[in-house]
Image: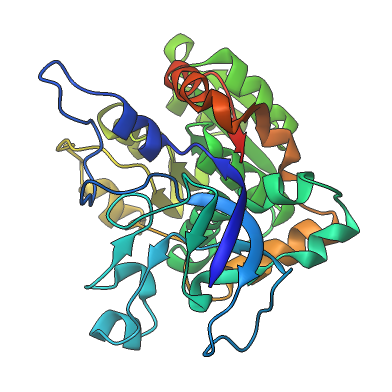
């Protein structure tokens, strides 16, 4: 299918591709195959369809998965498309949406016309571009992590877009306390708007002590690592786990992190890695939550740029003070 790109979100991965280390190499540590067209968080309008396209038609509004799974390898056949052995990552190892049009297989596209119930005009596409990062949080907490009982305490480290998505989803799912940590005050304010009951600057407190104080010494049932700062966050998580708790690891950090594993054994606790947003009805579930009005991702958007100012948008992303930066094409 040919999709006319309308709105794109700048992801941390995009920022890492824009930034370089002292030697001039890109910072991103995941799968890349360059050169390729950047951007993978986007929404648009179906412009043309091929003869094998059956579920979508020209004029449909769509959000797009960025994990291009093959459907034939063993993980895909086992229902784990996010672990596809032949995976390509849109905008990282395969051409993405940093263009007026993108050619995409129908299998990765989800109709978002339903969002017209709560949004209008180009806002629909801005919101559609947020489904992908929110999907990563949904996958980690509810699919890979198995969810939690309503009433649980949930701690989220990192108030970037994925962390903000985790905060909102945890609140919707019935968390009694959602506790957010970040080092940037602007993002802590957004975290509160997205549903965090408490938001602390990690540089000005001891997170584990805050969690234990707020839970009367019990600890958090779910802790989400969305900061990509494992050497800092994991030691604090170890000290604030409840019994039968879960650490959901979403952030990426190319570092080794020591962990006291006996804390997992004695407390029957788990640490779970999670990647991606594909399969399991994730996109469909998020679209329904947004269309119902229960999930309002619009609060995550703190800046919008026209396509001609994309370099300005990238520079702003390196400051890491925004929630989500949207570029309208």
Residue 1 pos. (x, y %)? 53, 73
Q: Is residue 242 left or right of residue 13?
A: right
> Front-most of 39 and 324?
39
Identify which residue is drawn at 14% across, 38% down. Answer: 256
Identify which residue is drawn at 64% across, 30% down. Answer: 191
Q: Is residue 234 left or right of residue 143?
A: left
Residue 203 pos. (x, y %)? 43, 12
Name above or below for residue 68 compared with residue 38.
Answer: below
Identify which residue is drawn at 30% across, 26% down. Answer: 232
Residue 108 pos. (x, y %)? 50, 71
Q: Quadrant of residue 276?
A: bottom left
Name above or below for residue 184 compared with residue 92.
Answer: above
Residue 213 pos. (x, y %)? 56, 26
Name above or below for residue 61 compared with residue 86.
Answer: above
Q: Quadrant of residue 241?
A: top left
> Front-most of 297 and 35?
35
> Front-most of 263 and 72?
72
């Amino acid at each position: 299918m040919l999709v006319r790109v309308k709105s794109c979100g700048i992801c941390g991965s995009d920022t890492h591709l824009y930034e370089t280390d002292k030697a001039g190499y890109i910072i991103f540590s995941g799968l890349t195959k360059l050169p390729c067209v950047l951007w993978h968080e986007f929404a648009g309008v179906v412009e043309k369809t091929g003869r094998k396209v059956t579920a979508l038609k020209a004029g449909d509004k769509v959000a797009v998965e960025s994990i291009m799974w093959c459907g034939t390898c063993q993980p895909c056949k086992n229902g784990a498309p996010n672990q596809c052995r032949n995976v390509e990552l849109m905008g990282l190892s395969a051409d993405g949406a940093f263009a007026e049009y993108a050619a995409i297989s129908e299998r990765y596209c989800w109709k978002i016309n339903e969002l017209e119930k709560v949004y209008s005009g180009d806002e629909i596409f801005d919101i559609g571009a947020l489904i992908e990062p929110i999907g990563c949080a949904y996958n980690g907490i509810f699919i890979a992590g198995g969810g939690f009982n309503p009433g649980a305490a949930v701690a989220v480290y990192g108030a970037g877009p994925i962390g903000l998505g985790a905060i909102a989803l945890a609140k919707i799912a019935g968390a009694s306390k959602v506790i957010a940590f970040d080092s940037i005050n602007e993002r802590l304010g957004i975290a509160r708007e997205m549903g965090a009951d408490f938001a602390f600057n990690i540089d000005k407190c001891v997170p584990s002590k805050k969690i234990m104080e707020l839970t009367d010494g019990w600890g958090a049932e779910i802790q989400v690592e969305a900061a990509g700062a494992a050497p800092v966050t994991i030691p604090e998580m170890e000290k604030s786990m409840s019994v039968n708790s879960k650490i959901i690891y979403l952030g990426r950090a190319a570092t080794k992190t020591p962990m006291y594993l006996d804390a997992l054994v004695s407390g029957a606790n788990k640490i779970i890695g999670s990647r991606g947003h594909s399969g399991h009805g994730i996109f469909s579930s998020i679209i329904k939550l947004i269309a119902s009005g229960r999930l309002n991702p619009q609060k995550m958007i703190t800046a919008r740029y026209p396509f001609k100012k994309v370099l300005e948008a990238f520079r702003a992303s390196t400051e890491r003070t925004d929630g989500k930066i949207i570029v309208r094409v």
